[in-house]
Amino acid sequence: MNLRRMFCLLSLLILVSQAFAGGPLSVGGPTFGIDGKPFTWDAAAMPIQYRVDTGPLAKLSGGAVTIDNTAGLARVQNMFAVWQNVPTTSIRFQYAGPILATGSFRGGDVMTIDDFNAVYGDCQAGTQNPIVFDADGSIVAALGLPPDIIGFAAPCKLDSATGHIDSGFALLNGQFQDGVNQGTNYELTSSQFDQAITHELGHFAGLDHSQINVSVLDGQLPCSTDQLAGLPLMFPVAYCQARADAGLPMLSPDDQAWISKLYPNSSFATSYGTISGIVYFSDGKTPVQGVNVIARLVDDPSTPADESLRNAVSVVSGFLFTGNPGQPFTGDNTDGDSNGSRNPQLVGYFEIPVPAGTYTVEVESIRSSFQAGSRLGPLDPPIASPGPPEFWNQSESAFDLPSAFDPIAVAAGQTVANTNFILNGTPARFDQFEDGAVSQLWQSIAPLPRLSKGVRA
C-alpha cells in the first residue's frame, strides 16, 4: 500500500467524545472524574488484563486463513510489550485468555456485527477488555466505515469516582494483512500494520495524539531519519515509512515521555524533569488554549544527527482545561462537556516531561486538518492560527524576534516553571463573545528556522 494513501487512515476514535493532547486522552472535570487530572488505568491494579478473539488475524474473503490466531496473538502481545518495556513506566499488560461469551456472543471468534455489538457492550459495562480480529474487514464494513480503516481503540468506560479507566477495546482490520492489494483491499507490510495498531493501543492506554516534526507532511517520501526519529508514534496520521524499516525503535522520545508521565515508575523522577508555563495572546494577559508547544533537545554540533529533530516532547496549551466549558445563552450548551477542568488558571497552561538535558521551547499552530478522528488537543477543529511560530526567550514580548531563543537546562526531578510565551502578531485577545474568525491570520504551520550544525547554542 502506498504510504501517501495512509495519510488519513490511522485513527478512528469513535469510542470517546473528548481528547486532550499531546499526552492524556481524557481529563476529569468538576462533575466527572477528578478535576484537571487525566483518566488513567489504576496503577495499583496492574497488569491490565486483556482478552483476544480466537479467530484468525487475517483471512481472504473466501475464507482461506493468511494469519492464524497463534501468530495474531503473538503480534498483539508484542505490540503491548512495546509500551510496557519503556524503562520509566509502570504500565503493564497481561493476556487473560479468549474474549468471554456475553449476550448473543457465545465466545470464540468475533465474526459478525451482532458479535461485535455484544462484546463492545460488555466492554462498556466494564466487564472485559476485548481485542477483536476483524479478519476480513467485514465488521468494519458492517459498521458503515470506509475500507481503509486499519483499526481503532480507546477506553470503553471511565470511572468518575476514581478517575480511572475501567475498560478498553481495540479492533484490528486483518484485511490489510490478507496478501491482496487491489481495489479497496489495501495491503500493508507487517511493520506498517503493527506500528498502526501499536498506535491504537496507545489510545487504549489513555494517550492522545502528539504533533512534532509536522513538516514531514509537506516533504518527500521517504521521510528523513532525523525527522522520523522524533515523529511520535502517536502522530495523528500515518505517513512516513515504518520506523522499524528505518532501523528506529517503535516509540519516539515523545511517546516514551508521556506513557511514563501518566504511569511513572520509581526511575521516572531520576530521569525526567518538567518544563511548564502559560501561552498568552499579544496582550500578555489573556491565556491561549490550543497552541502546540514543543521542547527540543539542543543540537550537538559534534554529531551528524540533528538531536533537535530526534529528541522532542510536546503538549497542547490548555490540555487540562475543557474544550467546551458551556454557556447558557444559546440554549444548546448548558454545562458544556463533562471532560476537562474549568479552572481558569489552566486555560493556557502547559507542562512537558523531558529527559534531563538542555532544550529550546517553541510554539506553533495545530495543523488545520487534524480534526475528528485525527484531532489533538481539547479543541476540535483547532483554532485558526493564533500567531506566528516562535521560540521562547527570556525577553518574551509581542514584538520579539520569533527565531530568538534561550536554552533551558532541566535536571532530573526539576520543574522549570514560568516558561511563558507572549504570542506575536495576534489581536490583543479574542473577544469573549465572538464566534467568527479574526481578521489577521498567519500561515498555518510555517516552520521555524532550523539552525545549522555548529550555530545552535
Image: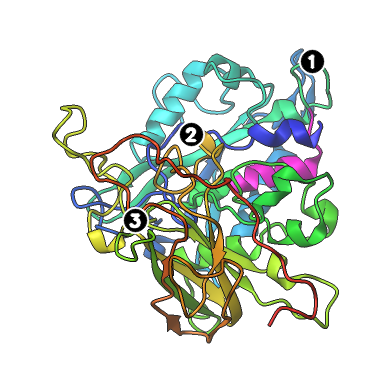
Q: Examine the rendered structure and indicate whether residue 109 appears above or below residue 339.
A: above
Q: Examine the rendered structure and indicate whether residue 378 appears above or below residue 232.
A: above
- The answer to whether residue 72 is seen in the rendering is yes
Q: Quadrant of residue 325?
A: top left
Q: Nearer the viewer, mark 3 or mark 1?
A: 3
Q: Nearer the viewer, residue 67 or 196?
A: 196
Mark 2 lies on residue: 372
Residue 234, x across and y down, in percent: 59, 51
- Quadrant occupied by the N terminus: top right
Marks 1 and 2 in Cβ contact (< 8 Å): no
Q: Is residue 371 left or right of residue 276?
A: right
| For marks 1 and 2 on the same chain, the one whose residue lies earlier in the sequence | 1
| For marks 2 and 3 on the same chain, the one whose residue lies earlier in the sequence | 2
Q: Quadrant of residue 187?
A: top right
Residue 14, x across and y down, in percent: 46, 31
Q: Nearer the viewer, residue 122 or 402?
A: 402
Range of residues picked out in magenta: 187-199
Residue at 69% across / 21% down in the picture?
136
Mark 1 lies on residue: 183
Mark 3 lies on residue: 428
Residue type, numbered disc 3: Ala
Q: Nearer the viewer, mark 1 or mark 2?
A: 2
Q: Residues within 10 Å of mark 3 (few under 14, many from 20)?
A: some
Residue at 40% across / 71% down in the picture?
277
- The question of residue 42 being in magenta is answered with no
Assign a secondary structure to mark 2.
helix
CA distance for labels 3 and 1? 52 Å
- The answer to whether residue 129 is seen in the rendering is no
Residue type, numbered disc 2: Ala
